[in-house]
Image (tube, rainbow, N blue to C red):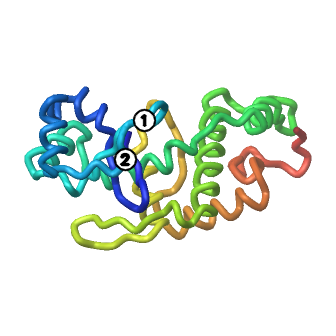
Amino acid sequence: MIAYYNKILTIEAGWLIENGVFSKSNYYQLSNRRQIKVVRRACYTKPALVAYDSMPDRFKCKVVAILGESPYKYEQKNLFTERIEESIEAMVFFEDYKLADGRKLPIKTRHTYYVNAILFDAIIKLVKKRKALRPIYLEDKKINKWEQISTWLQELPKSKYPHTLPTNIRRLQNRCKEYEKQGCISLIHKNFLNSNAKK
């Protein structure tokens, strides 16, 4: 829908038409008059792509209204959410983890730890793919990748991702390093840990 193509932020023409940004006939008129730049024509399996910055302001305003934010910010956020994947390994770890007295972790706690794990997995994938993290600006201030990540975490719907990851950038980085080094065990609160605990 919204993605970079040859370093240009583009929006699928079909999405623009389906969402009423402009009509199909209007799209062809704008294209023929070169009032929008079509950076890729539609072919058998690939949709036509329109350069966002080439669109007149009245259409840009419609796009922002539909998305609820700038398409630049929307595309950046998707870089993170599209990397959030289910993890059988993490699920099994927390389901099977036993305390020293043989009890399992509380169900709600298991789920929270699991969500923390898959979010850290997504962060690690994203950080390793450095080129994916393009600098973005908020109120004319350039922010770094960890600021971006912290913002995205705070914007995730808690009903879907009930995580407890820190919002402080330094703490988030440190926790992520611990997770990458130690794995799921690093997410279990010290109150649950015991030298005699067994998995």
Residue 141 in the image: above or below residue 153: below
Question: Which quadrant of the structure image shows residue 65?
Answer: top left
- The structure residue drawn at horizontal position 28% and vertical position 48%, both measured from the top left corner, is 38
- The structure residue drawn at horizontal position 42% and vertical position 35%, both measured from the top left corner, is 43
- Looking at the image, residue 111 sits to the left or right of residue 22; the answer is right
SS of the residue under disc 1: loop
Q: Which residue is mark 2?
A: 40
- The structure residue drawn at horizontal position 35% and vertical position 65%, both measured from the top left corner, is 136
- The structure residue drawn at horizontal position 75% and vertical position 47%, both measured from the top left corner, is 184
Residue 127 in the image: above or below residue 95: below
- Looking at the image, residue 119 sits to the left or right of residue 151; the answer is right
SS of the residue under disc 2: strand
Q: Distance from label 1 to label 2 (Cα)?
A: 9 Å
Residue type at mark 2 is Arg
- Looking at the image, residue 164 sits to the left or right of residue 68; the answer is right
Residue 31, horizontal then vertical, whole percent: 19, 44
Residue type at mark 1 is Cys
Question: Which quadrant of the structure image shows residue 159?
Answer: top left
74, 199: nearer the viewer:
74
Per the rendering, the mark at residue 184 is: none
Residue 122, horizontal then vertical, whole percent: 60, 49
29, 54: nearer the viewer:
29
150, 86: nearer the viewer:
86
Farthest residue toward the front?
Answer: 32
23, 88: nearer the viewer:
23
Per the rendering, the mark at residue 43 is: 1
- Looking at the image, residue 150 sits to the left or right of residue 109; the answer is left
